[in-house]
Amino acid sequence: MYADRKQWPLQEVQVRLGYSRIHAEDCAACETREGMLDQIDCEISLIGDLSDGQRQRLMEIANHCPVHRTLLGEIQIGMSLSAPGASLDKQLRQDAQEASV
């Protein structure tokens, strides 16, 4: 979107992800020092006749996307079992009503 708005010659974006578990003690940039950590490696290819400054700016934008920020933050996942055929929206409303009782 940003490149389109700026009318930059970005033709395509390719993203390759890799996932691994690493020992916390092997991560110099991590606060956690014990146990195992999840590591996601992300390689982005920007296809098009872009300047180095344009490529750098697009990477800055990528680092601020909501998914990237969510993955860098603390994540809590709430799970519940819903009745077969129940919509998620209906189940969430029902769960909220039960929680307020």
Image (cartoon, grey):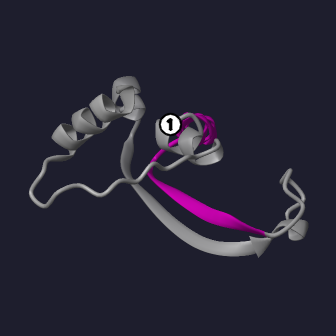
Residue named by callout 1: 65
Report the side of 43 relative to 97 (left or right).
right
Highlighted range, magenta: 36-62
Q: What residue sits 41% from the left and 33% below the top?
A: 3
6 to 91, vertically: above or below: above
Rendering coords of residue 39 (x, y %): 67, 65
Residue 31 position, x and y percent, is 86, 50
23 displayed left or right of 68: right
Q: Residues within 10 Å of mark 1 (few under 14, many from 20)?
A: few
Q: 89 or 26: nearer the eye?
A: 89
Q: Is residue 69 magenta?
A: no
Locate the C terminus and report the quarter of the image it occupies. Answer: top left
Residue at image location 31% in from the left, 34% down from the top:
98
At horizontal 56% and vertical 71% (from top left) the residue drawn is 18
Q: Quadrant of residue 64?
A: top right
Q: Residue furthest toward the front?
A: 101
